[in-house]
Image: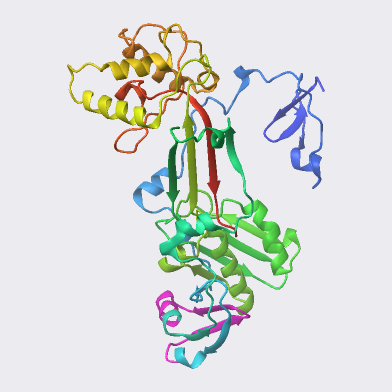
Amino acid sequence: AADLEVADGMVRPKAGENGIKFADLLTGNKFALQLDPKAPLKDPRTYTIVGQPLQRPDVPAKVDGSFIYMHDFKVPGMLHARVIRPPAIGAELLSVDESSVKHLPGVKVVRIKNFLGVVAEDEWTCVRAMRALKAQWSDWAGLPDQNNLVAALRAGPFLADEAIVKKGTPQAQLAADAIELKASYYWPIHTHGSIGPSCSVADVKPDSATIWTASQGTHGNRNTFARFLGLPRDKVRMIYLDGAGCYGMNGHEDAAGDAAILSRAIERPVRLQWMREDEHGWDPKGPPQLLANEVVPGVVGARSAHPKLTRRACLSVANEVSAASSRRDAKPSSAVESARSADRPSMSPRQAPPSAACRAAPPHVQRTFRRQQRAESGQSPAAGVTHADAYKFHPNPQGRIAPASRRGPACSGRPAAAIITASCPAR
């Protein structure tokens, strides 16, 4: 082994003789070699790629508009195709009236169970056929009312019921005067909205298939396409081309599947591009999510003799501090000072022991609250301190949870108990 080196995708003698390629060493088998963690590392001075400037030969063509994206790609003899979508997920195709597109020259209708598509020699004729073809679909109403989606998320059904965080005993602390902070965060269904609708070109023959796609998972999809096309894996080739960007997976894979199905059916190369309504309606979505948070603030770690703030006192102090913050020369009243004393009656921010939440907080969060505590104690923001409370919650009249530095620590106290839950719809 001391006489060998790894370079240019092969293992070869250091003396410069011919080597063996990695692929030949594997011969199609899985790489199950146990790695030695004590193996010597490559000398950085011998690096030929890492740390070296690399050329971007694709940039000039992308700048001048001559770059061939997935949507620009063509092969000789290809037809253009579109898929006709049902009005709802789960609808079944009942009938098709092919005579409705007879006036369009060269149009061929492809129906395979509930899959319906059209192909033509030119793209505009294909688009016109897609819009003119009359098809009857069954009814289906399995999706929740989009106007009541938040209620549907709360009601379920759910694949699982999971509490993300449980700290303390919040239910036991919800006495008549206990403070309970609640916040719900919801975001609806999101689409990728790629600037170019998904597109693919497929050339499926009886014994082989070549699919050009902008999919980010061509290696894994090769197995899927070989399976549904009924071909050996080594007879399916998937070639990546740059396409419209997405965060994760948009419709690239689905468009490639559409193209492959149609190409196999008509025994010709097919270019399949989704319409904008296909992309917005049928691409994989970011699911709607609802996060519900409940926090019961209290004084954690302080002596049991320290009184907790009641709901009434906290709201009173919060209103006063909020009003005082609008007057630069205003000083907090005795109620505010009393609340501060109730929180930490004998310790300054410099003296107070660090909390577990503080120690677990990211460094930038710790720095932020150190600055807040220094400002609260009248110190210079640049002065050093030994700890920081990572999180403080303050009710205010606007119903927001704001940083401590904006309204003082009157109603603060690290969370004594918290429940954070997340709900996602069942699929």
Start-end of magenta stretch: 102-129
Figure disc tally: 0
Whether residue 140 is in magenta: the answer is no
Q: Is residue 206 above or below residue 318?
A: below
Q: Is residue 114 above or below residue 412?
A: below
Viewer-side residue, 328 vs 366: 328
Viewer-side residue, 285 vs 102: 285
Q: Residue furthest front?
A: 176
Image quadrant where one finds the C terminus: bottom right
Whether residue 121 is in magenta: the answer is yes
Q: Is residue 88 above or below residue 159?
A: below
Query: Is residue 97 something one can see in this rendering?
Result: yes
Q: Is residue 87 left or right of residue 223?
A: left
Query: Is residue 250 something one can see in this rendering?
Result: no
Residue 234 x/y as whole percent = 74, 58
Picture quadrant where residue 49 is located = top right
Colour mapping: rainbow
Q: Is residue 179 above or below residue 198?
A: above
Identity of the residue drawn at 68% across and 20% down: 42
Viewer-side residue, 399 vs 371: 399
Image quadrant where one finds the N terminus: top right
Residue 315 x/y as whole percent = 33, 31
Q: Is residue 315 left or right of residue 186?
A: left
Residue 86 x/y as whole percent = 51, 76
Residue 266 x/y as whole percent = 60, 79
Identity of the residue drawn at 45% across and 87% down: 105
Identity of the residue drawn at 70% across and 67% down: 228
